[in-house]
Image (cartoon, rainbow, N blue to C red):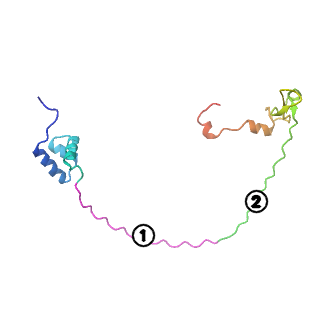
Amino acid sequence: MKLAYKLWTKKHTDQLRKLRATGLTFNQIGVMLERSKNSVIGKAHRLGIFSQPEFEPEPEPEPEPEPEPEPEPEAVKTSVYVKPVVRVAKPAIAARHVGLAELERDECRYPVGKDVSVPGAHLFCGTPTRDKSSYCKTHHNIVWQQMPTRVRDRGYRL
């Protein structure tokens, strides 16, 4: 009966110890002993010689000291007066609060409340609309808000 692998003899084990002590890699030792790298690693691990032999590293040259940078001249502190910007809000057009039957074609259809005199009836803004819109400028900006770029780029449909 032929084995699928080679058995480790005392001779091979001693060679493994010597070659590992010289600093060869497991791959190099496997080539020399005609075995796979993994076979050599496994045997070395079982023998307790898995770690790399310690070599004294060459001393690192001392880095040259960096010249000290020249001090920067001190900045001259000056005070700058910035005139505050005052924004005056434009007065909003007051809603007329009209019922649906009283709305004209170019009047805002934004619901603003309920008509208590008629059950189930709503009141609408009734101010002049923007071009080709059902809402005045104020309510158009409320109804038609642009989606954030992050959501818009994902391609979601609302």
Residue 66 tag number? 1
What residue is rendered at 76% in x and 57% in y?
85
Residue in the image at 55% along x and 71% along y: 72
Report the front residue among 94 and 131: 94
Q: Residue shown at 22%/44% (left/top)?
A: 41
For mark 2, give the secondary structure. loop
Q: Amino acid at mark 1?
A: Glu
Q: Position of residue 90 (x, y in %)?
A: 83, 47
Query: Magenta: predominant secondary structure element?
Result: loop
Per the rendered image, the range of residues in magenta is: 53-76
- The vertical placement of 69 against 94, above or below, is below
Does dot 1 land on a helix, a strand or a loop? loop
**Image position, residue 47 (x, y; %):** 18, 47
Q: Quadrant of the C terminus?
A: top right
Q: Which residue is mark 2?
A: 84
Q: Which sits in the foreground, 145 or 72?
A: 145
The residue closer to the viewer here, 66 or 92, is 92
* Residue 157 in the figure: left or right of residue 61: right
Which label number is shown at residue 138?
none
Determine contact: label 2, label 1, CB under 8 Å.
Answer: no
Q: Is residue 19 visible?
A: yes
Q: Is residue 125 magenta?
A: no
Among numbered discs 2 and 1, the one appearing first in the sequence: 1
Q: Position of residue 46 (x, y in %)?
A: 20, 45
Question: Is 56 placed above or below 143 here?
Answer: below
Q: In the image, what residue type sits under mark 2?
A: Pro
Residue 2: quarter of image: top left
Camera-near label (2 vs 1) is 2
Quarter of the figure that contains the N terminus: top left
- Left-right relation of 96 to 7: right
